[in-house]
Image (cartoon, rainbow, N blue to C red):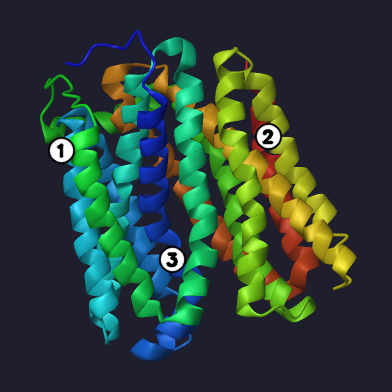
Amino acid sequence: MSPEKTEAPSRGLIALLATACGLIVANIYYAQPLIGPISRSLGLSPQAAGLIVTMTQMGYGAGLLLIVPLGDLFENRRLVITIVLGGALALMAAALSTHALPFLTAALFIGLGSVAVQVLVPYAAHLAPDAVRGRVVGTVMSGLMLGIMLSRPVASFITHVLSWHAVFMISSAMMVALVAVLRFALPPRQPAHVLSYGALLASMGGLVRHTPVLRRRALYHAGMFGAFSLFWTAVPLFLTETFHLSQVGIALFALAGVAGAIAAPIAGHVADRGWTKPATGLAMLAGALAFLISRFALSGSNVGLGILVAAAILLDFGITANLVLGQRAIYALGAELRGRLNGLYMAIFFVGGAVGSALGGWAYAHGGWPLTAWAGLALPVLAFAYYLTER
């Protein structure tokens, strides 16, 4: 078993981990702005087009529960390389697909291959001593959040210049190159082999029942991530109908969310200082405030667009900060549990994201942006109400 570290990892290694997380997690989100061209190319009906994103999300959700806990069992570097190589093959299969069934199958495995990021983040926590663990995790998470934010505009631009096939082909090549770098740059980390795989999975139910910090942090972020997913599901429709933005304009708007990534290292530093609880409340209030100010963007004017950009930045800042604060809290519960804790944490709030996406589409269809903003406001408010019960 690798002992807890007393020296912080080098800046170069932290930067590599942040870059790797950003490149890998982007694979989950490339298809979101490309549903239209992909569905037309593959002959999917409008009713079935949502499967393009849903299959990737299903694969990612399954991987969180079935693959990420293996970080507590197998040597981490080898595990990450194996998962990323599987994702590279799935990306190439998606790039070469000309019919719906092969593409949707590949999308499922793209999601599975993307869970490597959730092995790398607790791996980074293992490399860092307790005094700077929040800062290290926050820096790595800033790379992950940049990958999420940049993936949509990058996919839109590449598709505009080349094709949607090129998006997946380029990403597949990047994953192969990344594997080569990680193979030589990452130090190995071998956890203690105290459980079989079956026992490892069976222990996860007990962790949820007997770990109140995990339950709280996961439910806090379920509300926050639900708000994030609701916003980014509905806002492209709002931008098209009210502000008359093109696909490229929507891609440029999505870049506004990149500013929220700076919250990750700040939140990590705050957590290391012991200020997790007040910072959590502020993060939730920032998410709620974002939806409140977005109600002033209904005019379709340039001022309204500026208000919506500010709301996007504020929301992404709050979401990112709350995520890092939660990870710092659960990683302090024990090195031997981090893989399982991280998988459970992500899986629980991922459900919140799925609910938020569905709620965003429904709210916008039935009440436009006003109803969408109220629905989005409700999610961080509910999380904040639960937060107020914390002792």
- At label 1, the amino acid type is Arg
Q: Marks 1/3: CA distance? A: 26 Å
Q: Nearer the viewer, mark 1 or mark 2?
A: 1
Look at label 2 and name its amino acid: Ala
Badge 1 density bin: few <14, some 14–19, many ≥20, Cα 10 Å? some
Confirm whether residue 201 shows in the render: no
Q: CA distance from mark 1 to mark 2?
A: 36 Å
Residue 78 is tagged as: 1
Dot 3 falls on a residue whose secondary structure is loop
Seen in the picture, residue 96 relative to 280 is either above or below; the reply is below
Q: Nearer the viewer, residue 252 or 350?
A: 252
Q: Are marks 1 and 3 in contact (CB under 8 Å)?
A: no
Residue 147 higher or lower than 138, as above or below: below
**x then y, percent, for residue 192:** 15, 19
Question: Is residue 115 rendered to the left or right of residue 244?
Answer: left
Q: Locate residue 285, reporting x and y percent.
A: 75, 37
Quadrant of the rendered structure where residue 338 is?
top left
Can residue 290 be seen from the camera position used here?
Answer: yes
| Local SS, label 1 | helix
Left or right of residue 275, residue 35 in this image: left
Eye-nearest disc, 2 or 3: 3
Percent position of residue 217, x then y: 52, 30
Secondary structure type for disc 2: helix
In the image, what residue occupies the spot 35% across and 28% down?
A: 124
What residue sits right under mark 3 in the picture? 30
Is 296 placed left or right of 70 in the picture?
right
Residue denoted by label 2: 283
Q: Which of the marked residues, 2 or 3, is nearer the chain's N terminus?
A: 3
User: Which amino acid type is shown beneath numbered disc 3?
Assistant: Tyr
Q: Residue at x 66, y 39 (%)?
A: 318
Determine whether, in the image, residue 287 is placed left or right of residue 344.
right
Q: Are marks 1 and 2 in contact (CB under 8 Å)?
A: no
